[in-house]
Image: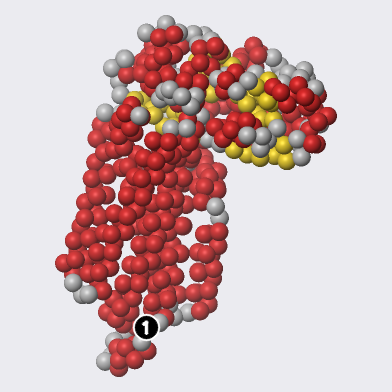
Amino acid sequence: MNERLSSALRVLPDYLSQHVLLSAASLALGLLVSVPLLIAARRSARVRWPVLAVASLIQTVPSIALLALFYPLLLGLSSLCKRLFGVGFPALGFLPSLLALTLYSILPILRNGITAILNLDPAILQAASGVGMTDRQRLLRVELPLAAPMLMAGLRTSAVWVIGTATLATPVGQTSLGNYIFTGLQVEDWVWVLFGCGAAVALALLTDQLLALIELGLGRRRPRLAWTGLGLLLLGVAAAGVVPLRAGRHAGYVVGAKDFSEQYILASLISSRIRAQGYSVRERTDLGSVFAFRALAANEIDTYVDYTGTLWTNILHRTDMPGRRRMLQDLRVQLRRRYGVVLLGPLGFENAYVLAMRRGEAARLGIRTIEDLARAAPRLTIGGDLEFFARPEWRMLEERYGLHFRAERAYEPTFMYKALMSREVDVITAFSSDGRIAADHLVVLKDPLHAIPPYDAVVLLAPKRASDPVLRRALEPLIGAIPLKLMRHANYMVERPADQRTPAQAARWLARAAHLH
């Protein structure tokens, strides 16, 4: 408990500062967009209706989908800029998160502002016109000041929405308080989940109260209150900006990780070895599979561990199965040629997708292979992780074996195993290096047609780190040094309910067990 809480506190300055800067920038940009739209819409129904309709439509798009949708758009624009001007820009992390959250922030500000202005007392507006005010003077001196309290109420709503939604920016590569939540859910570390939720709630409440102070000052014509609230808000944003600036002065290496326990352990192991060389390290975790590789290819992270089957099918879009050795050779050549990415070598174990069932259920149905499963599949429900059913591997399994299940359900990996044990699903797409296979007495179904490719864990280096001597000294001893048995045990140290360890503790154990010190 103390170890988990101390680890949460250790990364709080980074997570909180990034969350504050992202939220503040999104709100500021949303305000800059909303106010001109508000001014244009206040007198014209032709403008007002489509503006509010589009802003409302944006709110119907799931936030995590909107965050992800900006990635291919920005990636294309970046590639175009690089071809035209020789300079691109990051398509992951801050920029897609900023744009998505800005769009989410617009509706409350816009709707409250328009409603306030449209419901002003006509006598006041007539009096303003009667004393000779121009339309601009009436807007600036009468309409906006009178609408300011309700406009601030909209900004307060928008702020709470943005701060809450910013926790979902983690999978697209933006560090936020969501890192606590995503990591905690994966390893069942409820201290981290609650810590992340509590920090986000506290930030939202504090921001709302400071905005309420500004609203009170404007409503009661007490400028001092309004300036105090604004000053405290700006002070908080400035303080948040100091943290990444200070970190930037001492920036060393950035280690990436996907969103499951094995990745957290390996990232911690790699980070510790780089620190042992005397360099600082920052970890960017909870990245989606494609996002992780794209971040590496764009030099936004320096190294991470991926799997040959994922790279073969998702990155190179290959469907042939040339065998483990040939696949590794082709990946090494093609990743370097197409993306400048260096495949340093395999770690020594494989973490393949496998289909697993409860041992008793498999015996009862006479299922030992995926061919056997195909015959029973129409009566069964399959569970997979959040991305599996959209991956090429699933399509290959369906085609090779003719799999047609009664239902498909997607889960976070941790809950996928729980769903199997609670009989909510009959079969799951498990991971071969997962310690829960043995702990839960699951049976892994054989793949006689070899539809699932090899998934050797490999270390990748970003193009700018291709010949980096520090990374090579730190990481080359890992090549071929981690057998499946040790990795499976380290994973289960993090995943087991009793005597649960943190990924950092499991990484230290793995280093000792593999004689990597």
Q: Nearer the viewer, residue 88 or 442?
A: 442
The x and y percentages for residue 403 are: 78, 32
Can you say whether 411 is above or below 55 in the image?
Answer: above
Determine which residue is flagged by label 1: 120
**What residue lies at 32% left-to-right and 59% top-to-bottom?**
208
Q: Is residue 8 at all visible to an observer of this figure?
A: yes
In the image, is 370 to the left or to the right of 277? Answer: right
The x and y percentages for residue 368 are: 76, 20
Q: Quadrant of residue 157?
A: bottom left
Q: Nearer the viewer, residue 446 or 127?
A: 446
Other residues around mark 1 within 10 Å, as few (<14) / some (14–19) / many (≥20): some
The x and y percentages for residue 316 are: 63, 28
**What residue lies at 53% left-to-right and 45% top-to-bottom?**
68
Can you say whether 288 is above or below 272 in the image?
Answer: below
Q: Secondary structure at mark 1?
A: loop
Looking at the rendered structure, the kind of residue marked 1 is Leu
Q: Give the colour scheme of this rendering.
A: secondary structure
**What residue lies at 31% left-to-right and 42% top-to-bottom?**
17
Furthest-right residue in this view: 375
Q: Quadrant of residue 511?
A: top left
